[in-house]
Amino acid sequence: MDYQVGILGGGPGGYVCALRAAQLGLSVVLVEGDRLGGTCLNRGCIPTKALVKSADLWREMGRAEEFGLFAGDKRMDYGAVVARKDQIVNSLVGGVEKLMKSANIRVVKGWGEFKRVGQISVTTENGVEDLNVKNVVLATGSVPVRIPIPGADLPGVETSDEILEGTDLPKRLVIIGGGVIGLEFASIYESFGVKVSVVEMLPTLLPTIDEEIPKRLTPLLKRSGIDILTKTAVKQIRQEGDNLVVQVEDAKGLKDIPADRVLLSTGRRPSMKGIDVEGLGLETERGVIKVNSQMQTNLPNVYAIGDVVGGIMLAHVASEEGIIAVEHIAGRSVEMSYKAIPSAIFTHPEIATVGYTEQELKASGKDYRVSKFPFSANGKALALGESIGLVKILADAEGVVVGASIMGPQASTLISELVLAVQKGLRAEDIARTVHAHPTLPETIMEAAHGIEGKPLHLA
């Protein structure tokens, strides 16, 4: 064999898998037809977070007088916002390329195909090359779902991939889908002054997280100026002159929503591009590759990681799965655990979760405890001018932390303490009796932890 590990796909699952393989002394080849970093780095996590930062600053500038600051006329150049986003992405892609070189990982740029065990064929600009590999890791990621409704293929109807390439702001944006991606874009574009409407078929936004959070978030989004239409189906999109019109239907009947641009944000599906599923006899279920807890498929020496195996489609999950797969290849006794997977949603305010939701604990019939602490009672949050939201901790009957949700400033950073608690089976008392610096936002977590065994200290 030419290589001990061959990886098809260079996203956060594939390239992290390659780096760990190199650390373990394995010879590695990675095949990627596009740029390294995958959807996350090029068309997802990183570019959207660059836009989030610009949106947050623009929002803060609008509130400057609350802080006693008077900066005169403010002006936004969205083209410059996009240029900054692109510069960040290019810098990180270049960084991953350097990491590959420094780890002596061969990267082959081209259209990779996996048709037989032990070999990856790559069509490059110089022709076809067959790479003989002892172990194959499939990391082909996912693509946006285009819902089959009339007009979904009209110009101006875009997925998250296309809308990130835009260099101008629409006046009116209709977002179809009230999940994570849709709401992040809603917060970004609303901050920039775009009239945003979110259309969701289900009764609530963000249906997979603790139900208390979307109940609190929805009125905040409406107050900011975003139209939220739940229990509403999209019937068609049509062109009228220079405008798009999204026809929706709710309990009251049909309604037209005019738009300059429409964002299809109805989820992602695994990409089997380049994988001869039937010819190989690769076992799948409901469109995803079946794997065990070591990320092994039913084929010998063939592993699969990331979005292509379904489950929790997040970059950090793909990275961990890649590490598990290659450590198993190297002979280590490892197992992928999904017990404590954090999720971060970059709306305004931010949301982050880990572990069980309260509705899941209710459905299980098990005894549990719940404690909440508001950011409005935290000195640092008040000083920041970001006092909306709360920390919510769920614990079992013995006080062991089994889940948590945060809505408020820097939630995506704060959740890490609670991820560790869930992963290690810590009691809420362990957190409560850990001294937290003052004045800081993590004190909200300490206070909520006090509430599991008794009562928060700074809450009347």
Image (cartoon, rainbow, N blue to C red):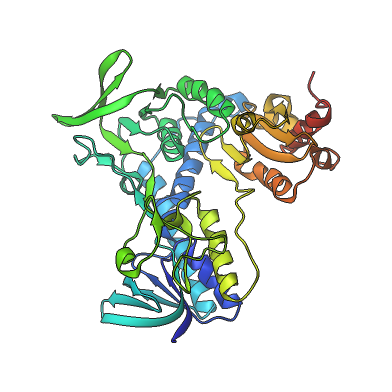
In the image, residue 319 sits, relative to residue 339, either above or below, namely: below
Kindly identify the residue that appears in the image at 49 percent across and 62 percent down: 13
Whole-percent x, y for residue 358 in the image: 63, 30
Kindly identify the residue that appears in the image at 31 percent across and 76 percent down: 122
Task: State which quarter of the image contains the C terminus.
Answer: top right
Whole-percent x, y for residue 176 in the image: 34, 33
Whole-percent x, y for residue 443 in the image: 76, 36
Quadrant of residue 457 in the image?
top right
* Residue sticking out furthest to the left: 241
In the image, residue 317 sits, relative to residue 186, either above or below, namely: below
Task: State which quarter of the image contains the N terminus.
Answer: bottom left
In the image, residue 332 sits, relative to residue 47, either above or below, namely: below
Q: Is residue 283 left or right of residue 57?
A: left
Total numbered circles: 0
Residue 18 seen: yes
Residue 437 seen: no
Q: Is residue 149 left or right of residue 96?
A: left
Q: Is residue 374 left or right of residue 300?
A: right
Q: Is residue 265 left or right of residue 422?
A: left
Kindly identify the residue that appears in the image at 38 percent across and 22 percent down: 231
Whole-percent x, y for residue 270 in the image: 38, 53
In the image, residue 426 sits, relative to residue 115, either above or below, namely: above
Kindly identify the residue that appears in the image at 31 percent across and 82 percent down: 129
Quadrant of residue 386 in the image?
top right
